[in-house]
Image (cartoon, rainbow, N blue to C red):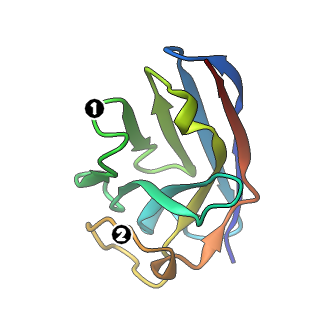
Amino acid sequence: QVQLVESGGGLVQAGGSLRLSCEASGGAFRIYPMGWFRQAPGKEREFVAGIGWSDINTGYADSVKGRFTISRDTFGNTGYLQMNKLKPEDTAVYYCAAAGNWPYSTMWYDRTSEYNYWGQGTQVTVSS
């Protein structure tokens, strides 16, 4: 069983940067694809970025492409989301997730149904 804890959220002005971290414990996080999702008030949870287990392949939502970068410690238990050039519309609770049903998959996944481990989320607020 994998436990995930996000950190690094906060309040930032538009144009600023934040780096989110996802610390994993209790399981084989390092062999699972992982992803970042976000949920704004009144909206559904949406895909932000994903990465395969060996961090060769990454994918991004069009809304963050070129501004956000997903990465992970290849042999460790931490994932990251570097967020640059933040916009007010990036305001949301950000969640990290691990796809435990796909060990050693080099693919990234953009559907919440592919992920069976979730963190509690960290709030990101971008002021204009």
Q: Nearer the viewer, residue 43 or 52?
A: 43
Residue, x 62% and y 38% (percent of image)?
91
* Residue pointed to by mark 1: 66
Q: Is residue 112 left or right of residue 8?
A: left
Q: Is residue 45 left or right of residue 66?
A: right
Q: Quadrant of the C terminus?
A: top right
Image coordinates for residue 120, horizontal then vertical, percent: 76, 58
Asked if 98 appears above or below 10 in the picture, the reply is: below
- Which type of secondary structure does the marked residue at label 1 adopt? loop
Tell me the amino acid under the disc marked 2. Tyr
Check whether the beta carbons of the residues at disc 1 and disc 2 lie within 8 A of each other: no
Image coordinates for residue 34, horizontal then vertical, percent: 46, 61
- Which type of secondary structure does the marked residue at label 2 adopt? loop
Which disc, if any, is residue 127?
Answer: none
* Residue pointed to by mark 2: 109
Q: Nearer the viewer, residue 80 or 92?
A: 92
Residue, x 40% and y 42% (percent of image)?
70
**Disc count in the image?**
2
Q: Is residue 49 left or right of residue 19?
A: left
Image coordinates for residue 54, horizontal then vertical, percent: 31, 57
Q: Nearer the viewer, residue 53 or 58?
A: 58
Q: Is residue 67 left or right of residue 57?
A: right
Residue, x 50% and y 25% (percent of image)?
86
Q: Label 2 crowding class (10 Å Cα cut-off): few <14, some 14-19, many 20+?
A: many
Nearer the camera: disc 1 or disc 2: 1
Q: Label 1 crowding class (10 Å Cα cut-off): few <14, some 14-19, many 20+?
A: few
Tell me the amino acid under the disc marked 1. Gly
